[in-house]
Image (cartoon, rainbow, N blue to C red):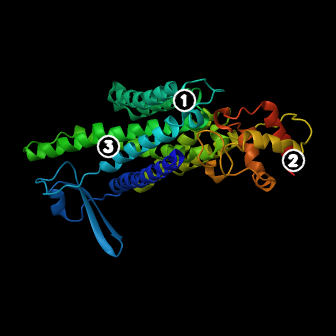
Amino acid sequence: MEAGFVLDWLNLVLRWAHMIVGIAWIGASFYFIWLDNHLHKPLDPADAAKGIGGELWAVHGGGFYTAKKFTLAPEKLPPELHWFMWEAYTTLITGFLLLCLVYYHGAEVALIDPSVMALTQWEAIAIGLAFLAGGWIVYDRLCRSAFGDDELVLGGLLFLFCAASAWALCHLFSGRGAYLHFGAMLGVIMVLNVYFVIIPGQRALVTAKREGRVPDAIHGLRGRQRSVHNTYFTLPVLFTMIGNHYAGLYGHDWNWVLLIMISVAGALVRVWFVQRHKGNPNPLVLAAGLVMLALTALASLPRPTVDIGPPASFAEVQPVIQARCAPCHAARPTQEGFAAPPKGVVLETPEEIRARAAAINQQAWASRVMPPGNLTKITDEERRTIARWIKGGAR
C-alpha cells in the first residue's frame, strides 16, 4: 500500500472528524450563550422561590421546550446531569493530530518558508508547540492576575498579546503555517478553559451540593468569564481554519496585520450577536466589525504593479510552469511529498494552464506563496515572466 494513499485517507478522516466534533462543540457553546442571554424572570412565582433565576420557552421540531436556570444550584440534585466537555476535548485531539499530519509531518511544504526564516523541521515543530503551550500559560496568568477583574483592561492586554503572537508567527513561519498556528493557539486556550476552569468549577458546585454545603459563587463567575472569552475567540479561530485558501491574505507583506484586523472583525460581529441575544444590539458594534472587514480587504489589495517589462507569450511562460509548477500540479506529481495534485489542480496542458491563469498569477507573483517553501526553486525572473504573460492577456 502506497504511503501517499494512507496519508490522504488519514488526512480525510481526521479533517472530517475534526469538523464534526468542532461543530458539536461550537454549536453547543453558541446555544448556551444564546440561552443564557434569553432567560426571563420565571412565570411561576413558585419557581423563583426554588431558586430559579430565569427561564426560556421555545418551540422546535413540533414540540414545546422550557429551560430553567438556577441562580446558584437546585436544592436537590437530579439523578442524572448532562455534562458538555467531550465535544471540546475531541476537537482538540483531532485538531492536534491533523496539525501533526499536515503541518509537522509536512513541515517543509506547509510550515517552513526559507524566505521568512530558515528552520529545520524539528526547530519549526518545537516553535509551534511552544506557541500552543505558551499561549495558554500567558493567557491564564493574565486572567488570574490583578488585571483579570477588570474586563476592559484584560481585554486590552489580550489584544496586545494576540497582536504580538500574530507578528511573531508571521516572522517565523510561512504565512499559511502562521495563520493556522495563531488559530490553533486560540483553540488550545478555548479547550483548556473548559478543562482547567469551566469543568472543575462545575464539579466543585456539584460536590458542594452533594455534601450539603453552599456552593461558592466564584466558580460560576470564573466559568462565565472564560466562556465569554471562548465565544469571542470562536470566529477568528474558524477563519484561520479556512485561511489557507486565501493566499492574498497570508501571502501579503503585512499578513500579520491582516490577521489581526480580520480577527477583530470576527470578534466584533460576535459581540453584536451576543448583544442581540440580550435584546440591546448596538448597530455601531456591527458596523465597526463590517468596516474592519472592509478595511482588511482594502489593505490586502495587490501592490501596484512595477514595470515588469513587455508582455510575454505562452511559449515563454510554459517552460516556467512545467519546471516550477507541474512537479506538484500534475496528474502524477514528481515532487517528493505529493501523492496527488494540491486541491486537484493540474497544470500540464496549455488548456489547463490558460484556464488557471489568474490563480497562477495570484499564487506565484502577487502573493509569492507558491511553490510552498519555494520547493522547485522558482526565480524572481520566472515569477516576472508569469506576470508579463498575464499582462499580455494570458493568451
How far apart in space, not on screen, are marks 3 and 1 (Cα)? 30 Å
Q: Amino acid at mark 1?
A: Leu
Horizontal and vertical percent for residue 112? 58, 31
Q: CA distance from mark 1 to mark 2?
A: 38 Å
The residue beneath circle 1 is 169
311 on left or right of 102 = right
- Residue 224 got which mark? 3
Q: Is residue 200 above or below residue 168?
A: below
> Which label's residue is closer to the chain start, 3 or 2?
3
Q: Label 3 amino acid? A: Arg
Residue 185 lies in what quarter of the image? top left
**N-terminal label among 1 and 2:** 1
Measure how far apart labels 3 and 2 are at the Cα level: 61 Å
Type of amino acid at the residue the image marks with label 2: Phe
Residue at point 71% right, 42% down? 363
**Residue at the front extreme?**
1
The residue under label 2 is 314
Question: Quarter-wise, where is residue 174 in the image?
Answer: top right
